[in-house]
Image: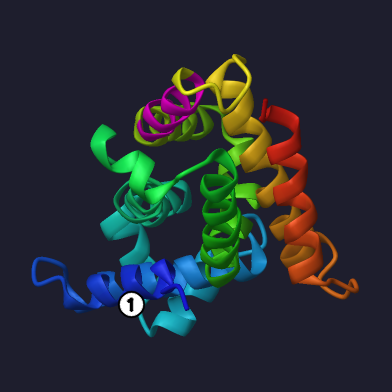
Amino acid sequence: MQHSILNSYKKDILENKTMTAKCKRVLETSIDLFAKNGYSNTSTSEIAKIAGVAEGTIFKHFGTKENLLLSSIMPFIFDYVLPEMIIDFEDVEIKDIYPDFKSFIHEIVYERFNFMSENYKVAHILLAEVLYREELRIKIVYGLKSTIMDGFDKILNYFKENKMIKDVPNGLIVRTVISNIGGYVVLKYIFDPDGNYNDEKELKYIEELIVNAFSL
């Protein structure tokens, strides 16, 4: 089972020796409430009440509610979410780990699904708030590209050089993979959680769709 990066983040907050106990409680509470209710539906008074601090403490340490969002979400994204998405293999290892394109896509589909399933609250935060804020959206998109594309490029170029996949832009393949896996997770956990899902069957279809789309 994949670990919850949200729990890891909150654990590290609590163990931070440079942060006051009140700040720790505010950050931990705010990220839980932002994930559960959304930024707009979470008030600083509610955060303060659950964290057991005065509302003035929030403004004293973070200035504004938006600064609190930035203080809780941005380190989470760049220090916890993006590193989990890195694909980093040496050229000499690719052929041993992934003998063909299908084996690579199989691992990506199932590992990313498991990771996103364990951390769907992260997707909720990103979709509900961050993606509607242009400045944050630009930073996150840039971070994603700089974090994951090098690894993908290395592996996909290897498959192209060995005539395993079509010579199409790597970005197209990456977007197809991310949109299919991410779309399924978002539907299942956020937009239609009461739907009738068969993970094994649907992930198999996603895998076959991607493999058939790009294999030679």
Can residue 142 be seen?
yes
* Residue 103 vertical placement versus 124 (above, below): above
* Residue 181 vertical placement versus 158 (above, below): below
Question: Does residue 216 show up magenta in the picture?
Answer: no
Closer to the camera in the image, 104 or 84: 104
Return the x and y of residue 16 as percentages of the image width and height.
Answer: 15, 70
The residue at the point 59 percent across, 14 percent down is 167
Name the image quarter holding the C terminus: top right
Within 10 angstroms of label 1, few (less than 14), some, or many (20 or more) residues? some
* Residue 24 vertical placement versus 191 (above, below): below
Return the x and y of residue 68 as percentages of the image width and height.
Answer: 40, 54
Return the x and y of residue 129 as percentages of the image width and height.
Answer: 61, 48
Q: Which residue is mark 1?
A: 25
The residue at the point 46 percent across, 67 percent down is 30
Residue 41: image quadrant is: bottom right
Q: Of helix, strand and loop, which one carries label 1?
A: helix
Closer to the camera in the image, 130 or 111: 111
Can residue 88 be seen?
no
- The residue range painted magenta reads 151-160
- Kindly identify the amino acid type of the residue bearing the numbered disc 1: Arg
Magenta residues: mostly which secondary structure? helix
Q: Total marks drawn?
A: 1
Would residue 24 be found to the left or right of residue 204 on screen? Answer: left
